[in-house]
Amino acid sequence: MSLLSFRNVWVEYGDKVVLERVNIDINAGSFVSIIGPSGAGKSTFLRLALGQEAPSQGQVFLDGKPLRPEPGPDRGIVFQRYSVFPHLNVRENVIFGLDCASSPILGRSFGAARRRAVEQAEEMLIAVGLGHVMNEYATALSGGMQQRLAIAQALVKNPRVLLLDEPFGALDPGIRADMHELVTGLWQQHQLTIMMVTHDLKEAFKLGTRVLSFDKRRVDPHAPHRYGATAVYDMELTRKNQAAEAARMMAAI
Amino acid sequence: MTRLVNIRPGRKAAAGLAAIPLILIVIGYMIASAVRHAANPADKLLPTFMAMGKAFKNLALDADPITGQILLWADTLASLERLGIALAIATVTSILLGLALGLIPLIRAQFGALVATISVIPPIAILPVLFIVFGLGEASKIMLIVIGITPVMVRDVAAFVAALPQEQMIKAQTLGAGSWLLTIRVALPQMMPRLIVALRLSLGPAWVFLISAEAIAADVGLGYRIFLVRRYLSMDIILPYVAWISLLAILIDMALQFISRKAFPWANRSSN
């Protein structure tokens, strides 16, 4: 059974159809890259998985159960920006997620629970390469380090699926390459399921085991919002065909 | 030649430049006062600094023969008590309503327009209502300040909370936070420095409302005193009292600024 399935999903805002007839199954352990032109509903698709948005028709299932349209701790998210807490230091940013689970009233743990949380958070921070800045405020970090922190925050909750919304879009090319290495490493090590929206085709093919390309199948020039987008290409990548698929894809676009 | 807009004074030069107008005002006052006293030694309109110092010393050190109190301290204590209680009520209300309006769309839909409407009512215009409802005691004066500053503070902090990045709110929910933890762990701490800014900006109006209320109905207080001695044209008391009120206002403002810097260092970092 697939981890996440979209069954005949439509998203409409009034007359505007954003997504139509989306039928996709995401298997556990896959790394799905989502690409497509601006306005093709990539981010809307990700927000469906996140629960930030509800489908107008159809259903989304997580582990076979209908997904409540609300973000929850079983789905981690890293946005392009603003996903760390500026009023907490790096260590506290990661502990936050652990405290939410262990202390629903105060949101803060004490004693042995606190020591366990600190230990777990520090371990995760070292894994993402932030061991040396744990006492800094989150806003004092560079863009790349803030994204590392956002990933650490999400991973410490052991989410069923990790959602990345153009996570490296605002970073320099060099930093981006480091982040690719980090994410690939964490994905293998923690056996994560990842869905990543990106504008960068190379990035999509380099990281993904599967690439979904969203676009509109039909366009009515007199009513551009009449038809929604859907996954027009769905490619499983293996090491062997990765380069070939990428080349074909580039040619098609 | 360097353009005027690009000439920046150093620290010492800036302090010197800032002092010049103040010194000029003091000298101008002394000359005007001397001229008037040369024409009429009993002039009350522009008292000399000596006369003001003496009057202020009497009020600050000597007990009033009728009440046995030292007037300056009695007035200061009474006024600061009214101001303090009012600021505390306004602050607590702003925290509760600011979080509720800023975070919960249902409450914003239900009460947002009401708060906006209340905030346009001129507080002084409803002072008679307050006197009728709360009597002439402390409650009406405190309520005037509360009604005068709270709606503006509430709207400011509520707008700030509502404008916190949506990404952060979603992120917190994916980390397991519900409405309550979002409120106390994400929104509240980030709102606090903004609340202090709102409070500092409200201090000016708060003093205006305090002195207005005291001028109309009180038997002790800084505003009461200056309006009382106005009948005797006692500028030698009024001017030092105005200076004293200004000094208190500056000290309160500096204290709030200090608290904000110490308690919320992260907030002042991003503005740098």
Image (tube, coloured by chain):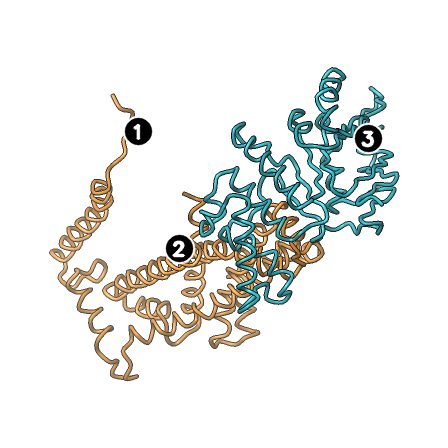
Chain colours: A cyan, B orange
Marks 3 and 1: in contact by CB < 8 Å? no
Note whether B175 is above or below A163 in the view shown. Answer: below
Q: Nearer the viewer, mark 2 or mark 1?
A: 2
User: Mark 3 belongs to which subunit?
Assistant: A
User: Mark 1 belongs to which subunit?
Assistant: B
Frontmost residue, A192 versus A151: A192
Residue receiving disc 2? B261
Quadrant holding the N terminus of chain B:
top left
Residue receiving disc 3? A230
Residue A229 is labelled as none
Frontmost residue, B168 versus B11: B168
Residue receiving disc 1? B6
x then y, percent, for residue B128:
53, 68
Give the left or right position of residue B85, taking residue A6 as reference. Answer: left
User: Mark 2 belongs to which subunit?
Assistant: B
Query: Which amino acid type is marked by label 3?
Result: Thr
